[in-house]
């Protein structure tokens, strides 16, 4: 997987987790830390880790021009 694609997919995951959390908070009117920790926050963290890993791979790459 290219670093560009990894960063874009990570960003997409993080934004979808934020959207899911906002839908739960404002759509259902329920701010439950237990629920938010299980689904949306894990998706946000997964996306941020993928995005950071793509940035790291890009910064240490020796074959780019």
Image: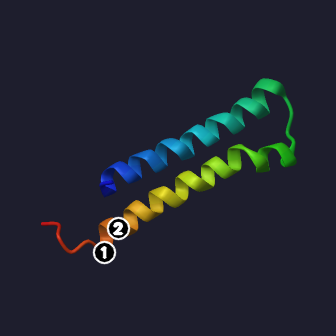
Name the spot of residue 15 as percent of width and height, x first. Answer: 55, 41
Residue shown at 47% from the left, 50% from the top: 10
Which picture quadrant has residue 53?
bottom left
Name the residue: 39% across, 53% down.
6
Against 32, is 46 above or below? below
Question: Crowding near pointer 2: few (<14 within 10 Å), some, many (20+)?
Answer: some
Residue in the picture at 77% in, 48% down: 38
Residue that label 1 marks: 60
Q: Quarter of the image containing the C terminus?
A: bottom left
Image side of residue 53 versus residue 36, left or right:
left
Mark 1: few, some, or many residues within 10 Å (few <14, many ≥20)? Answer: few
Residue 24 percent coordinates (x, y): 76, 32
Classify mark 1: helix, strand or loop.
helix
Q: Are marks 1 and 2 in contact (CB under 8 Å)?
A: yes
Closest to the observer, 23 or 38: 38
Residue at horizontal 61 percent and vertical 50 percent from the top: 44
Left or right: residue 56 compared with residue 30 = left
Image height of 28 relative to 62, above or below: above
| Residue 7, numbered label | none
Q: Which residue is mark 2?
A: 57
Quarter of the picture containing the N terminus is bottom left
Name the spot of residue 18 as percent of width and height, x first. 63, 41
Q: Relative to 31, is 64 above or below?
A: below
């Amino acid at each position: 997987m290219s670093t560009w694609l990894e960063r874009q997919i990570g960003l997409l995951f993080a934004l979808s987790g934020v959207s899911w959390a906002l839908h739960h908070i404002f759509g259902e009117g329920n701010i439950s830390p237990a629920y938010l920790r299980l689904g949306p926050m894990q998706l946000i963290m997964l996306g941020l880790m993928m995005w950071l890993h793509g940035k790291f791979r890009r910064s240490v790459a020796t074959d780019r021009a």
